[in-house]
Image: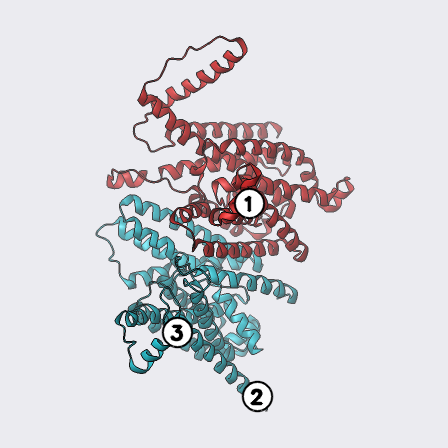
Amino acid sequence: MMNYRYVIILALLVSVVGLFITGVYFGGNAKSITIDDTTNFVIYQTKSTVDSIYYKITGKHIFPQTPLDESTKFKYIILKKYRLPPIVGAILVGLTLSTCGLMLQTLFRNLLSSPYTTGISSGVLFAVTLVIFIYSFAELFSTFKVDENIIAGWCGGLLSLIMLIIIALRVKEVNGVLIVALLMSYLFRGISAYLMANGTDFTIQEYYTFIIGNVARVNVNNIFQMVISTIVFIIGSIFLIKPLNALLFGETYAKSFGLNVKKIRILILLLASFIVGVIIPYVGLMAFVGIAAPYLARPIIRTSDHRWLLPATMLVGVVLMLMCHIISLKYWVPIFYLYNIDRPAQVLPIGSILDVLGGLLVIYLVYNGEKKIRIQ
Amino acid sequence: MGGILKVKRFLGLYILSLVLLVILSYFSIAEGTIPIKDEQLEKYLLEGTTGNVIMDQIIEKLRLPRVVGAIVVGLGIAVAGILMQGYFRNPLADPYLMGVASGASLGVVLYVFTSLLFKMGVPRSIYGFIISAYIGSLATMVAVINMARIVKQTATLLICGIMIGAIASGLTTLVVYTGDYMGEENSKLAEYLMWGMGSLNNLTWGQIKIMTIVIIPTVILTYIFFSKKLDANLLGEKYAISVGVDVKNLRKWLITLSCILTATVVSFTGPIAFVGLVCPIMARMISGTSKHIYVIPMTALLGSIYVLFADILTRPGVVIPQTSNNIPLLAPLSIIGAPIAIIVYLKVRKMGI
């Protein structure tokens, strides 16, 4: 059994790497960049990185660099600035949001909870919308010397967290919490639509990319914050594995285990809203990763032990997001061959594909029997 | 004695809401980017012209269609809501939250897309829009009903409806982008996106005529033939059968009628949220009974009032500054509707329905 799980995790890792490479090679619609160019770019980047490290240690060059000609330089810039960051963004989104979903599902003991359905995402999105449309909010949040979107995201996350706790105190059953949270997200959306009235075309465009969800907004400047927060999040979630396992057996068991259940709950919620508050402001609303990835991971890994389930969920989330990313870039291929259209296609927002795939999956999940929508 | 009192009370309520409707219609004609003054309106009513050709045009081509459209749309969607609530025996059922409205909009978008894909294809006519919206809403409805058979919990059903809405909106984006790739003009596609949030801006008299022809008879027929049966159905299937109501037949009719109403409205205005949920509940609260003979007309009136009011709120110069753009109808509808829905949900839970 142990071996089986190792094999599964390894297979998932391999597919992540495979999809990553596919993404790097085919993740763009620029015709001038050929496959050879990409290979050269990868080799060049690796060489220069190794060389710079080596140079710092010993003071000598291991791979002496030849200056590039203009067109190659331009191609490399495109690859580095526009092709790689969205892929990394997709990986980060898949990793963090699916883990969040798993934690919330264990916490609420309900397979339909995720950052989206519990309203955390909508709260973050609402705060970011305020920053987009109202100038004074942007001023207020930018006083912290950090990107104002992150601060706004955290504020929104905390706000929705408090709301979630209040709702959970009033409504005991979990589905009720989800419904109230979803209805609240409608309210937020309505208020955002009112804000749109004063927006310029540019801000309205920005808002639309937010509500659909798009990794193309991730760029070299903001990827650093996302990576750092993701690492913090992963470390935090590793510490939460044991308490999560204890929660799985029920509250009384967890208490007898010597666990402070209330503290653990608040910790989980805080961690979730922390990472959602960092990720969502850059990529927009990603609705279904949080539900779909844990749901797919459970039958694959065949256990609900979080020591295995957590990494499996992370990897499945990454695979899902990378697949969606590649589809969002290549959706025009069948039409291209059917109609011989020769013009560049826009990149589809990844959120729409995620909506379709994830939504179908969730409905299948409900369809498959409500009995199973409980965590044994 | 009690019966007469009741009738008197209802007459009073109806007259009150009709007066409210008239007052709101006045505001709806007067407010907007170019406000119309009282004297002008008085002159228009008495003499048939304001004395200014442009003002006449504004009233006839822009404002009046919106007033009539809002009344008809509100009526149709509110009655569709009451029919769905009867079907699911669940006060939280609503054409928008159940995903039926999104299904209808998906049908319309797919229709446009197919007419793009097969270039000789289907002509783009109003009837094509209606029929595709109807097919889309029916398909979604069938999916929701199938799910309702499995899922006994109200809450899960609602979540499923919301998921269906998400799928529909995702597919809509997909179709819009593909259409863009195939060479549809950008502005038109942006229009479809905007249409996805509901708006009464672009209604023409021709569209309103079609809506009225479909909606008003459907609502009247529903009122005449189904109000008693709906009462019996609300008390439970066994009771309804023992009273002599063919429940299976009734349920089929409920679905068909609510789909027709929803599809007709949605194909012209885009999804209209929360009206079908809020109005029946308010009607029941105001009239203090859930007998459909009293509730259906009240719901229809309230629906008209609600949509008219929301439409006034979307105009520039009412809540938002004079110089700004129109807001989608979704904004006021959900800002008013969502809190009411939450309160209702919390109350319903306490009553244990």
Which mark is drawn over residue B271? none
Mark 3 element type: helix
Three-letter amino acid code of the residue under disc 3: Thr
Write down which chain is painted cyan: B
| Residue at horizontal 39 percent and vertical 60 percent from the top | B270
| Residue at (30% x, 76% y) in the render | B50
Residue B153 image position (x, y, % from top left): 58, 59
- Badge 2 local density, few (<14 within 10 Å), some, or many (20+)? few
Q: Secondary structure at mark 1?
A: helix
Q: Which mark is residue B5?
A: 2
What is the spatial separation of the Cα atoms under label 2 and label 1, in whole angstroms?
60 Å
Look at the picture and state if B293 lies above or below B279: below
Q: CA distance from mark 3 to mark 1?
A: 54 Å
Residue beneath disc 1: A140
Q: Residue B269: percent from the left, percent from the top?
A: 37, 62
Q: Quadrant of residue A231?
A: top right
Q: Position of residue B86 (x, y in %)?
A: 51, 69
Circle 1 marks a residue in which chain?
A
Q: Answer whether residue B254 is visible to the viewer in this image.
A: no
| Chain where mark 3 sits | B
> For the residue carrying disc 1, how many other residues have a C-alpha within 10 Å: few (<14), some (14-19), or many (20+)?
few
**Contact (CB < 8 A) between labels 2 and 1?**
no
User: Could you tell whether B3 is left or right of A40 in the image?
Assistant: right
| Contact, mark 3 vs mark 2 (Cβ under 8 Å) | no
Identify residue type, mark 1.
Leu
**Label 3, on which residue?**
B218
